[in-house]
Image (cartoon, coloured by chain):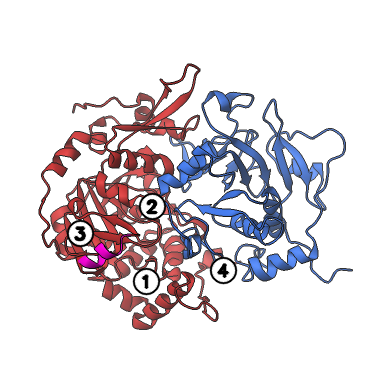
Chain colours: A blue, B red
Amino acid sequence: MSKVAPANPLEMLAYNISLMIEDNQIVYIGTGLPMVGAILAKKTHAPNITMVYESGGQDPLEGEMPWSVGCPFTYRKSPMTLEMAISFGQCAIGYVDIAFQGGAQIDMYGNVNTSVIGSYENLKAILPGSGGGNDIGSLTQKSVLVGLQTPDRFPAKVDFITTPGYLDGGDSREKAGLLGGPIAVVTQVGIYDFEPVTKRMRIKALNPGMSVEIAQACTGFELLVPEGEVPFIEPPRDEVLEILRNEVDPRRVFTKMPGS
Amino acid sequence: MTTNFEYNQEALKNLQIDDPSILDRLIDGESARQAHLKKERGKVDKRISLKEAVQEFVKDGDIYADSGFSYVRTPLQALFEVMRQGKKDLQGIGSPNTNHSYGIPYGTFSYSHNSYLGAEMRGTDRSYSKAVKEKKVKILSEWSHGSMGLGFKAAQMGAPYIASKSLLGSDIIKYNPYVKVVENPFKKDKDPVCLIPALYPDVVFIHVQWADKYGNARIYGPAVNDIALAVAARKVIITAEEIVPESDLRNTTNTNVIPFMFVDAVVHLPYGAVPGNCPGYYYWAREFWEWGIRIALSGKDDKYRDSFWDYWVFDCKDQFDFIEKLGGIRWLNKHQVIERALNGINEDDGIDLSYQSVIPKWDEE
């Protein structure tokens, strides 16, 4: 029996994010769990990735530090920093391979809402707004959406499209003139992709202990299920968990479960 | 009122803007050009106090921009002086525009060109949501960081607009009267692009680490939109941690420089980004921000908000009063040490980053 405690849901989420990253990629990093996942990837299977940030940081040296997007960590000893407009230009012109983003709502076509709950005319709440989300999701070759999955947070249609996914599905994203697109959604339940023709969200693999029924119960629309048996994600090996806990997020800033 | 510009009618309707002339100045390149043509050409000592700078250069109703990123190198002490002087009806613009919401209850900001308001992991600014619902602030346009940044870049380049692939297909476009989707005229096949007009704020405060007395200014860390903003804005005020000799800037040309001719005034303002972070100088006051976003801006009760700003803004005459309230020289030194360690300038082994996180009673379970 392993002496290392199994991954909690947030650690599993960070691990799944790390699996999205391949070695030698240029990775555009947002705040929070994507940062944890990217550094985990760098310290395990993808040592040669380069991280870039919205505020313009390029290839910082990582340190054992707490994080926020404005943190000195995003440009620590960077050879240079770029201006914000140019950092998004990097996504559009093909100098970013993969980017991550979260949202208050993610819908069946991977559209993301970080703007309003309700509508402007009938406002329930104003959310923080796009920030760089719209740009990252509109421009980057591959984007990965990260979220905690509940029926409210995964509705059939978002209240407001802040960041376009596949819009109404099919070829509507391409017709709108957008570049790249979301390739996956990573949640505490598992990993989803988008069915190639309809562009609807589809289960790709589930976390240990999850099931298609649980995934569906956490979703406000009908999930597509792949043919045959749904694969399960191998839990992270002990040495990966130890790197995550001891080197990547030792203060448990992002991977501590609330209340624990 | 008449307008000389063609706005997106759907956005005007959605935002309930009856008189679009209020939108004009932001994209009025000719008036920005005229303002720039009238600027002082000589290399003269432009140093004045913060009070004088705000009195002279911030007019009621101005489109107000500032530097940095949310709580990094943001001229917060200048913003607090703007609030103290009772300036009214400003249009806040910035990517992000996190800090503009503070002045809404006092009438400092009545309009918003919105891209991002909040403090990321620290929380959401619910008071802004409340102010929009209560019509204390009017949203004039919605943006993403990239699209707004391109608007400033277009102004910097002297280009009337830039074509971008941001915003296409999104609902942001339905709430932005300025941007337009057209077909790329260079392509035979259909290829929608989003046209983003050059954006010209009236006044920008840019906080930097080093400037000379003429206004040449150097930035360490991310420049964000500031190099573009310095060109785009009609009036530019530099607030600087240190005023250095001109020769110092001439001999170190490898960091970002804003040339003196864009600059109207230079304010020597050490700790001008407190309670935010000034790269290489001091770390941010984490407890202040958590208290602010989780209690004062929670939207729960106006008394939390009013007592917060009374204490931190209206009962302070300057940044030194503010630092005394944070904990004086002990607070300052601790945050200087942390900042230098995080940047790899000082040894980081053994640096204590612990602090008492502010959790409101209503969030405790």
Mark 3 Cα-neighbour bin, 10 Å: few <14, some 14–19, many ≥20: many
Distance of label 4 from label 1 (alpha carbons) = 19 Å
Query: Which numbered tag is attached to residue B281?
Result: 1
Q: Disc 2: which chain?
A: B
Dot 2 or dot 1: first in sequence order is 2
Locate residue A235: give its quadrant: bottom right
Mark 4 Cα-neighbour bin, 10 Å: few <14, some 14–19, many ≥20: some
Q: Disc 3: which chain?
A: B
Which residue is drawn at the image coordinates 43% and 31% (left, top)? B173
| Marks 3 & 4, CB-CB < 8 Å contact | no
Give the residue type that dot 3 points to. Gly
> Along the horizontal axis of the image, is B281 left or right of A153?
left
Mark 2 Cα-neighbour bin, 10 Å: few <14, some 14–19, many ≥20: many
Report which residue position mark 2 lands on.
B224
Question: Is any atom of residue A131 visible in this view?
Answer: no
Q: Nearer the viewer, residue B5 or B41?
A: B41
Q: Nearer the viewer, residue A79 or B234?
A: A79
